[in-house]
Amino acid sequence: MAHGTSVPRSWKELRDVYGGPVRFLNDGYINAEPPVPTNVPELDEHLCGGLRSGLNVLGGEPGGGKSALALFLSMSAALSGANVLFVSLEMSADQCWSRCASCMSLEIAKERDSEEFRFRWGDVWELGQKAKAREDAAKRTGKAEEFVRELMASDPVGIAVDRLASKCPGLAIADDPALHDIGGIEEAARGARELGMSMLVVDYLQYVDVEGATDEYGRVSAVSKRLNRVGVECGVPVLALASLSRTTAARKPGAIPDMHAFKGSGDIESNALSAWIIDRDPDEPGVRRLHVVKNRNGSVTDDEPVRLRFDGAHNSFERV
């Protein structure tokens, strides 16, 4: 019994201590937390509306687009009003923001019917050097304030960042070294939940350290278990990225992957609410297939994966 709770005198009292069906009707049905949509209609259909509290795993081969997809889904969730904490253990926060700004530039270029406002995320550094030269010139002439206004009004990256700030105010990206440890992630998640976090994204699972783990299998098992627990405890979905095994990378092109594809898979199979794998379409190089290989709250994709056209230079996905 919970501390301070009187000892139940009947089975009904015991049931009600832990929450009976009437509690479910109020808290788990009428006032249930809504799932966080991915805004990929076919994927949300399989997930029965979106992501629910607990662990969800996205796997992929190196360079296959899993980090890009996780960032894209985080932006999409933020566009829908969700507060998303993206923990990046592989890329710096600035690299992630470059990708997000590049993706946003596609929308701006289309609205203004001008390629001038479209840029690849790989070009951001070079564009930044040009902006720095303009800033230095403005400071020398005492026009620093005018430069800031010009940056947000006419510079392609400045415009994209301004759009990001206004349309995705709930997106936060963290690359703090303390977050490389599972304890640091748990602490950050609990603090973020108190401030309204709707979803936690961890890129990626195999990079998370855990005390006491002596091999990759044990580390992946412990991390996946604790990420699932913190998701349930905080009442938010956790999307964790994961590597695939070398045997998966060498499988026959076009073959449908399964849960055994995850590298050092440990207890991912039992801990995850859902598990997805992204790979290249063998017939269309620019298309990615998204396989839902496990799903407690809906259906799997079997031999009909979700197909998305991938623009890696702009970190963008669109339905095929």
Image (cartoon, rainbow, N blue to C red):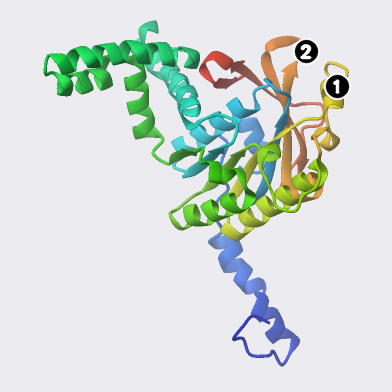
Which residue occupies the foreground of this view, 71 or 26? 71
Pick whichever of labels 2 and 1 is earlier in the sequence.
Answer: 1
Say which element carries label 1.
loop
Residue at point 66% right, 50% down? Answer: 227
Q: Residue 282 carries which label?
A: 2
Q: Residue 55 carries which label?
A: none
Q: Is residue 250 above or below residue 218?
A: above
Question: Please, which residue is most extreme toward the left here?
Answer: 142
Say which element carries label 2.
loop
Residue at point 82% right, 22% down? Answer: 249
Residue 239 % position (x, y): 63, 41
Q: In this view, does 162 lie above or below 29?
A: above
Position of the N terminus, as image quadrant, is bottom right
Does residue 4 appear to the left or right of 94 in the view shown?
right
Residue 306 % position (x, y): 70, 26
- The kind of residue tagged 1 is Ala
Residue at point 51% right, 48% down? Answer: 198
Residue 162 % position (x, y): 32, 27
Q: In which quarter of the image is residue 179?
A: top right
Q: Which residue is the site of mark 1?
A: 255
Which residue occupies the foreground of this view, 204 or 111? 204
Which residue occupies the foreground of this view, 89 or 20? 89
- The kind of residue tagged 2 is Pro
Does residue 129 appear to the left or right of 305 in the view shown?
left
Q: In this view, does 216 lie above or below 193?
A: above
Residue 16 % position (x, y): 66, 80
Q: In which quarter of the image is residue 111?
A: top left
